[in-house]
Amino acid sequence: MRSALLVFVAKQLGYPSGIWGRLLLRLLNRENAGMHQLAFDQLAIRQGDRILEIGFGGGSLLARILQTGLPEKVIGIDYAEDALKVTQRKLQRYVRSGRLTLLQGNANHLPFPESQFEQICTVNTLYFWPDASAVFHECYRVLRPEGTLVVCYNTPTVLAEQGLIQQGFKGYEVEAVENLLSQTKFQLIQTISGKDSSNGQYYCTCGKR
Ligand SMILES: C[S@@+](CC[C@H](N)C(=O)[O-])C[C@H]1O[C@@H](n2cnc3c(N)ncnc32)[C@H](O)[C@@H]1O
Protein backbone atom coordinates (compact mmCIF):
# COMPACT_ATOMS: atom_id res chain seq x y z
CA MET A 1 0.00 0.00 0.00
CA ARG A 2 1.37 3.46 -0.76
CA SER A 3 2.71 5.06 2.39
CA ALA A 4 0.36 8.08 2.63
CA LEU A 5 -2.63 5.79 2.18
CA LEU A 6 -1.25 3.32 4.72
CA VAL A 7 -0.74 6.09 7.30
CA PHE A 8 -4.34 7.18 6.75
CA VAL A 9 -5.82 3.66 6.95
CA ALA A 10 -3.75 2.77 10.06
CA LYS A 11 -5.01 5.90 11.81
CA GLN A 12 -8.59 5.14 10.82
CA LEU A 13 -8.30 1.55 12.07
CA GLY A 14 -7.38 2.83 15.53
CA TYR A 15 -9.96 5.61 15.57
CA PRO A 16 -12.45 5.47 12.68
CA SER A 17 -13.97 8.86 11.95
CA GLY A 18 -15.71 10.81 9.19
CA ILE A 19 -16.94 9.43 5.87
CA TRP A 20 -13.86 7.25 5.31
CA GLY A 21 -14.00 5.93 8.84
CA ARG A 22 -17.65 4.94 8.45
CA LEU A 23 -16.86 3.26 5.13
CA LEU A 24 -13.94 1.41 6.72
CA LEU A 25 -16.14 0.15 9.56
CA ARG A 26 -18.53 -1.43 7.06
CA LEU A 27 -15.58 -2.96 5.23
CA LEU A 28 -14.20 -4.36 8.50
CA ASN A 29 -17.50 -6.16 9.12
CA ARG A 30 -16.84 -8.13 5.93
CA GLU A 31 -13.05 -8.48 6.09
CA ASN A 32 -12.95 -9.52 9.75
CA ALA A 33 -15.82 -12.03 9.51
CA GLY A 34 -13.47 -14.98 10.12
CA MET A 35 -12.05 -13.42 13.28
CA HIS A 36 -15.54 -12.54 14.49
CA GLN A 37 -16.66 -16.14 13.95
CA LEU A 38 -13.67 -17.49 15.87
CA ALA A 39 -14.36 -15.13 18.79
CA PHE A 40 -18.09 -15.93 18.68
CA ASP A 41 -17.39 -19.67 18.81
CA GLN A 42 -15.35 -19.23 22.01
CA LEU A 43 -18.16 -17.40 23.81
CA ALA A 44 -20.46 -20.44 24.21
CA ILE A 45 -23.33 -18.08 25.00
CA ARG A 46 -25.97 -19.23 27.46
CA GLN A 47 -29.49 -18.03 28.13
CA GLY A 48 -29.50 -14.89 30.27
CA ASP A 49 -25.81 -14.01 29.82
CA ARG A 50 -24.64 -10.41 30.05
CA ILE A 51 -22.01 -9.82 27.40
CA LEU A 52 -19.63 -6.92 26.75
CA GLU A 53 -17.75 -6.24 23.51
CA ILE A 54 -14.86 -3.76 23.66
CA GLY A 55 -14.06 -1.86 20.42
CA PHE A 56 -17.04 -3.19 18.45
CA GLY A 57 -16.26 -1.06 15.34
CA GLY A 58 -18.92 -1.76 12.70
CA GLY A 59 -20.94 -3.98 15.04
CA SER A 60 -21.04 -7.30 13.19
CA LEU A 61 -19.88 -9.40 16.16
CA LEU A 62 -22.51 -7.71 18.33
CA ALA A 63 -25.11 -8.62 15.68
CA ARG A 64 -24.01 -12.24 15.69
CA ILE A 65 -24.26 -12.38 19.48
CA LEU A 66 -27.71 -10.77 19.53
CA GLN A 67 -29.06 -13.03 16.77
CA THR A 68 -28.71 -16.02 19.08
CA GLY A 69 -31.55 -14.53 21.13
CA LEU A 70 -29.86 -15.86 24.25
CA PRO A 71 -28.24 -12.97 26.15
CA GLU A 72 -30.28 -10.96 28.60
CA LYS A 73 -28.16 -7.90 27.82
CA VAL A 74 -25.39 -7.00 25.39
CA ILE A 75 -23.24 -3.88 25.83
CA GLY A 76 -20.76 -2.48 23.34
CA ILE A 77 -18.14 0.11 24.23
CA ASP A 78 -15.98 1.95 21.70
CA TYR A 79 -14.26 5.32 21.95
CA ALA A 80 -15.00 6.36 18.36
CA GLU A 81 -18.21 8.35 17.98
CA ASP A 82 -18.62 7.18 14.39
CA ALA A 83 -18.45 3.52 15.43
CA LEU A 84 -21.42 4.25 17.69
CA LYS A 85 -23.30 5.97 14.86
CA VAL A 86 -22.74 3.18 12.33
CA THR A 87 -23.60 0.40 14.79
CA GLN A 88 -26.55 2.27 16.28
CA ARG A 89 -28.08 2.44 12.81
CA LYS A 90 -27.23 -1.16 11.94
CA LEU A 91 -28.61 -2.60 15.18
CA GLN A 92 -31.33 -0.07 16.02
CA ARG A 93 -34.03 -2.68 16.61
CA TYR A 94 -31.96 -4.25 19.39
CA VAL A 95 -31.16 -0.84 20.88
CA ARG A 96 -34.86 0.07 20.86
CA SER A 97 -35.79 -3.20 22.54
CA GLY A 98 -33.26 -2.49 25.31
CA ARG A 99 -31.30 -5.69 24.66
CA LEU A 100 -28.31 -3.71 23.33
CA THR A 101 -26.66 -0.63 24.82
CA LEU A 102 -23.85 1.17 23.01
CA LEU A 103 -21.51 3.37 25.00
CA GLN A 104 -18.72 5.74 24.06
CA GLY A 105 -15.78 5.08 26.35
CA ASN A 106 -12.25 3.84 26.79
CA ALA A 107 -11.29 0.22 27.39
CA ASN A 108 -8.83 1.19 30.11
CA HIS A 109 -11.63 2.54 32.30
CA LEU A 110 -14.76 0.42 31.93
CA PRO A 111 -17.75 2.34 33.33
CA PHE A 112 -19.28 -0.58 35.22
CA PRO A 113 -19.31 -1.85 38.79
CA GLU A 114 -17.48 -5.11 39.40
CA SER A 115 -18.83 -8.59 38.48
CA GLN A 116 -21.27 -7.53 35.77
CA PHE A 117 -20.63 -9.83 32.80
CA GLU A 118 -20.47 -13.55 32.04
CA GLN A 119 -18.50 -12.85 28.86
CA ILE A 120 -16.26 -10.15 27.44
CA CYS A 121 -14.90 -10.20 23.90
CA THR A 122 -12.65 -7.96 21.88
CA VAL A 123 -11.33 -8.34 18.32
CA ASN A 124 -8.52 -6.41 16.64
CA THR A 125 -8.27 -3.83 19.41
CA LEU A 126 -5.23 -4.90 21.43
CA TYR A 127 -2.86 -3.08 19.07
CA PHE A 128 -4.22 0.33 20.08
CA TRP A 129 -4.10 0.02 23.84
CA PRO A 130 -1.27 1.98 25.50
CA ASP A 131 -1.51 -0.38 28.51
CA ALA A 132 -2.98 -3.81 27.69
CA SER A 133 -2.40 -4.99 31.25
CA ALA A 134 -4.62 -2.19 32.59
CA VAL A 135 -7.40 -3.19 30.17
CA PHE A 136 -7.18 -6.86 31.18
CA HIS A 137 -7.38 -5.84 34.85
CA GLU A 138 -10.51 -3.86 34.04
CA CYS A 139 -11.97 -6.90 32.25
CA TYR A 140 -11.17 -9.08 35.26
CA ARG A 141 -12.84 -6.59 37.59
CA VAL A 142 -16.12 -6.41 35.65
CA LEU A 143 -16.35 -10.14 34.86
CA ARG A 144 -18.36 -12.38 37.15
CA PRO A 145 -16.55 -15.28 38.81
CA GLU A 146 -15.93 -17.95 36.14
CA GLY A 147 -16.72 -15.39 33.45
CA THR A 148 -14.80 -15.64 30.18
CA LEU A 149 -12.57 -13.14 28.37
CA VAL A 150 -12.01 -13.70 24.63
CA VAL A 151 -9.27 -11.70 22.87
CA CYS A 152 -8.80 -12.12 19.10
CA TYR A 153 -5.77 -10.63 17.33
CA ASN A 154 -3.07 -10.86 14.69
CA THR A 155 0.52 -11.37 15.81
CA PRO A 156 3.45 -9.06 14.92
CA THR A 157 4.49 -11.05 11.82
CA VAL A 158 1.18 -10.50 10.02
CA LEU A 159 0.85 -6.94 11.29
CA ALA A 160 4.35 -6.19 9.95
CA GLU A 161 3.50 -7.80 6.58
CA GLN A 162 0.51 -5.47 6.42
CA GLY A 163 2.81 -2.52 7.25
CA LEU A 164 0.90 -1.80 10.46
CA ILE A 165 3.65 -2.37 13.03
CA GLN A 166 5.56 0.32 11.14
CA GLN A 167 2.57 2.62 11.76
CA GLY A 168 2.72 2.17 15.53
CA PHE A 169 0.44 -0.85 16.02
CA LYS A 170 1.49 -2.80 19.12
CA GLY A 171 1.90 -6.45 18.20
CA TYR A 172 1.85 -9.27 20.75
CA GLU A 173 2.97 -12.85 20.36
CA VAL A 174 0.55 -15.46 21.70
CA GLU A 175 2.82 -16.15 24.67
CA ALA A 176 2.83 -12.45 25.59
CA VAL A 177 -0.99 -12.29 25.57
CA GLU A 178 -1.23 -15.49 27.61
CA ASN A 179 1.31 -14.10 30.11
CA LEU A 180 -0.62 -10.85 30.45
CA LEU A 181 -3.83 -12.77 31.18
CA SER A 182 -2.03 -15.00 33.62
CA GLN A 183 -0.51 -11.99 35.43
CA THR A 184 -4.05 -10.60 35.70
CA LYS A 185 -5.03 -13.83 37.51
CA PHE A 186 -7.08 -15.29 34.66
CA GLN A 187 -7.21 -19.08 34.71
CA LEU A 188 -7.68 -21.92 32.21
CA ILE A 189 -5.94 -19.79 29.58
CA GLN A 190 -5.92 -21.27 26.11
CA THR A 191 -5.33 -20.06 22.56
CA ILE A 192 -6.72 -21.33 19.29
CA SER A 193 -5.91 -20.10 15.81
CA GLY A 194 -7.77 -19.41 12.60
CA LYS A 195 -6.74 -18.42 9.11
CA ASP A 196 -8.34 -16.73 6.14
CA SER A 197 -7.37 -14.74 3.07
CA SER A 198 -8.22 -11.34 4.64
CA ASN A 199 -6.26 -11.63 7.87
CA GLY A 200 -3.82 -14.49 7.40
CA GLN A 201 -3.19 -16.44 10.59
CA TYR A 202 -4.86 -15.05 13.70
CA TYR A 203 -5.38 -16.11 17.29
CA CYS A 204 -8.00 -16.13 19.99
CA THR A 205 -6.78 -16.27 23.57
CA CYS A 206 -9.36 -17.00 26.25
CA GLY A 207 -9.20 -16.97 30.02
CA LYS A 208 -11.62 -17.49 32.88
CA ARG A 209 -11.94 -15.28 35.88
C1 LIG B 1 -9.57 -2.11 13.94
S1 LIG B 1 -11.11 -1.65 14.63
C2 LIG B 1 -11.82 -3.27 14.92
C3 LIG B 1 -13.31 -3.24 14.96
C4 LIG B 1 -13.98 -4.61 15.19
N1 LIG B 1 -13.68 -5.11 16.52
C5 LIG B 1 -13.55 -5.59 14.15
O1 LIG B 1 -12.81 -6.53 14.45
O2 LIG B 1 -13.97 -5.45 12.99
C6 LIG B 1 -10.68 -1.16 16.28
C7 LIG B 1 -11.86 -0.59 17.04
O3 LIG B 1 -11.48 -0.50 18.42
C8 LIG B 1 -11.81 0.80 18.92
N2 LIG B 1 -10.85 1.06 20.00
C9 LIG B 1 -9.49 1.06 19.92
N3 LIG B 1 -8.96 1.32 21.11
C10 LIG B 1 -9.98 1.50 21.99
C11 LIG B 1 -10.06 1.81 23.37
N4 LIG B 1 -8.97 2.01 24.12
N5 LIG B 1 -11.29 1.93 23.93
C12 LIG B 1 -12.40 1.75 23.20
N6 LIG B 1 -12.39 1.46 21.88
C13 LIG B 1 -11.19 1.34 21.27
C14 LIG B 1 -11.69 1.71 17.70
O4 LIG B 1 -12.42 2.89 17.86
C15 LIG B 1 -12.24 0.80 16.59
O5 LIG B 1 -13.63 0.91 16.45
Image (spheres, rainbow, N blue to C red):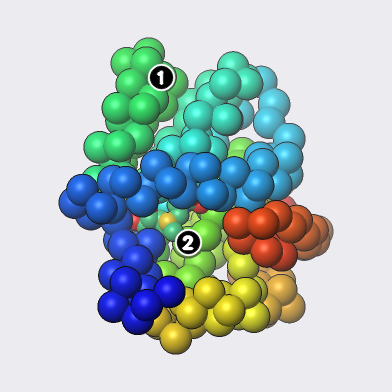
Q: Position of residue 72 (x, y in %)?
A: 53, 21
The residue that appears at 19% across and 51% down in the rendered structure is: 18
Q: Residues within 10 Å of mark 1 (few under 14, many from 20)?
A: some
Along the line of sight, which residue is nearer the eye, 112 or 153?
153
Please give the residue where the numbered disc 1 appears in the rendered image.
Answer: 94
Dot 2 beta carbon under 8 Å from ligand 1: yes
Q: Is residue 206 visible?
A: no
Indicate the amino acid at tag 1. Answer: Tyr
Q: Position of residue 41 (x, y in %)?
A: 73, 40
The residue that appears at 35% across and 35% down in the rendered structure is: 87
Along the line of sight, which residue is nearer the eye, 73 or 94?
94
Q: Position of residue 23 (x, y in %)?
A: 32, 46
Q: Is residue 194 visible?
A: yes
- Compared with residue 203, is residue 78 higher up or lower down, i.e. above or below? above
Q: Residues within 10 Å of mark 2 (few under 14, many from 20)?
A: many
Classify the position of ligand 1 by quadrant: top left, top right, bottom left or bottom right.
Answer: bottom left
Left or right: 28 as drawn, with respect to 35: left
Please give the residue where the numbered disc 2 appears in the rendered image.
Answer: 125
Q: Residue furthest front?
A: 2
- Compared with residue 64, is residue 107 higher up or lower down, i.e. above or below? below
- Alpha-carbon span between mark 2 and mark 1: 24 Å
The residue that appears at 38% across and 62% down in the rendered structure is: 13
Left or right: 154 as drawn, with respect to 72: right
Indicate the amino acid at tag 2. Answer: Thr
The residue that appears at 59% across and 44% down in the rendered structure is: 33
